[in-house]
Amino acid sequence: MVSLPLSRPRTYAIRTLGCQMNVHDSEHIAGVLERAGYVPVDEAAARREAAAALEADHTSLPAADVVVLNTCAVREAAATRLYGNLGQLAQVKAAHPGMLIAVGGCLAQKDRDHVIAHAPDVDAVFGTHNIGALPELLEAARQTGRPQVRIAERLEQFPSDLPARRADAYSAWVSISVGCNNTCTYCIVPSLRGQERDRRPGDILEEVRRAVAGGAVEVTLLGQNVNTYGVSFGDRTAFSKLLRAAGATPGLERLRFTSPHPAAFTPDVIAAMAETPAVCPSLHMPLQSGSDRVLRAMRRSYRSARFLDVLAQVRDAIPEAAITTDVIVGFPGETEQDFAATLEVVERARFASAFTFRYSPRPGTPAAERTDQVPPDVVQDRYRRLTALQERVSEEENRAQVGRRVEVLVATGEGRKDAATGRLSGRARDGRLVHFSVPDDVPSPFAENVPDDGPSPARGADRSGAAPRPGDLVTCVVTASAPHHLIADSALGGGTFSVRRTPGGDAWERATAGDRAR
């Protein structure tokens, strides 16, 4: 194997293909690599280098010394994305002797040696239960020149016990449990992540406190079924207690959680949401289907009436709540009558937005073995009709927000057109995406040589003339809407606009300065 010169540390890049759990796992993958001496690659420079090596105009995958693909196994498209990425990486690797490729996550846990068989340029394969083994596997591959595969059947170390490099300095994921005790017939996750294991409440609260002390103003509690938290130690009200305790953390502005299960969503959780100021008025509640017959076939332990009743209870307690969902179209045996029931529930539920999916058979699940698979053209037609309905509902719900005063947590990566429009972007407390304008005399936080105003004043102080940084909170008024976002241009006419600088913005500045220094 070709060794790197000792004059510089080895670099890494991570590509995450999957859900929020994968995103959080990627933070821990970054943490264990940095503990082993790796540094994050300068991705802009690495992409230019990789593109030049390939004699192409661009590439989406950088030429780091180690590239990790953290995979998902929920849908067939995830496997297609993985092997497409690996095909491109093989070309980059050929131009960069000594480069290593690692594959982790749910698809790695599932396919194991098949990854090497399909992609011989892969150097290391690790699963969902042994993230901490990655540096050792990479070193073994480097020394031996042979691919290393290590998949643990049981969790070796709770991921939250591993070091982490947060994707955003001002926002943190905090895992409260791993695994799932449900047996949904379409889902392969329980076989890959195992049965539910809950962390101790004190450990969770300590991680929340550390995150806030490090600058996070927003925390999202994460689990496959967050509201079944407590099953491991026999406390059915543990999640509502955790919400109240975490929400009382000094300095925490926003507390979110994902994802709950409708069958286990109890009044004590709704009360904790309504009575804890830090808990945001947003809820992601997976529907999957509006047909009771299909829900039964999916082994989803609720029915459509129960689902709608939960939403009604939430809205009674939190009228401003924005509720989102997941819906699967074309589950085996789904009839036109079943699909009509789904359309009816979606219409009545008035979701702010929905993640809609065509059913994807996953080998090893009961649903994949069924002989009554819905023809692809029928699935596509139903998918089109469902998305058209939800687009209309989302547009109507967002139009009702026009004129509303919103507090936006400024974020990076939320506005693809910000450079062209001159706006900045972030999320309102209810989770809606807001693109907002700043007054002409307010500089951009991304501009070079922005004057240093010194450290933030006390939390809550108003800095109306300061540049809003990612992690700061901006108050503005919604002036227009679209199905997937809100526009807040109130600042342009001299209207409502103020900036509250926060420790989250300070943390972003520190992180950005550190990245530039590297």
Image: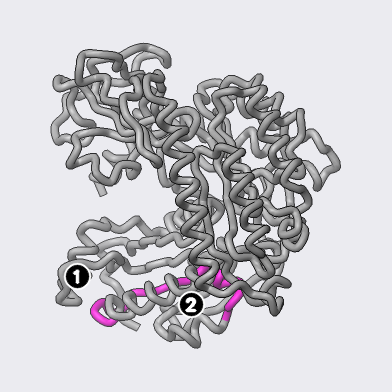
Q: Which residue lies at the image location 16% right of the left edge and 28% below the top edge?
A: 450
Q: Which residue lies at the image location 44% right of the left edge and 83% below the top edge?
A: 119
Question: Is 253 situated left or right of 287 in this image?
Answer: left
In magenta, the rendered stretch is 94-112
Question: Is 461 situated left or right of 47 in this image?
Answer: right
Q: Is residue 454 above or below residue 102?
A: above
Residue 56 appears in the picture as rendered = yes
Asked if residue 103 lies in the magenta stretch, the reply is yes
Q: Position of residue 318 (x, y in %)?
A: 61, 23
Asked if residue 177 lies in the magenta stretch, the reply is no
| Badge 1 element | helix
Closest to the observer, 108 or 163: 108
Q: Which mark is residue 140?
A: 2
Q: Quadrant of residue 370?
A: bottom right
Q: Is residue 237 above or below residue 374?
A: above
- Foreground label between 2 and 1: 1
Q: Quadrant of residue 497?
A: top left
Q: In the rendered structure, which amino acid carries the disc numbered 1?
A: Ala
Q: Position of residue 206 (x, y in %)?
A: 62, 34
Q: Quadrant of the N terminus?
A: bottom left
Q: Earlier in the sequence, mark 2 or mark 1?
A: 1
Q: Residues within 10 Å of mark 2 (few under 14, many from 20)?
A: some
Q: Is residue 514 above or below residue 443?
A: below
Q: Which mark is residue 51?
A: 1
Q: In the rendered structure, which amino acid carries the disc numbered 2?
A: Ala
| Badge 2 element | helix
Closest to the observer, 406 or 19: 406
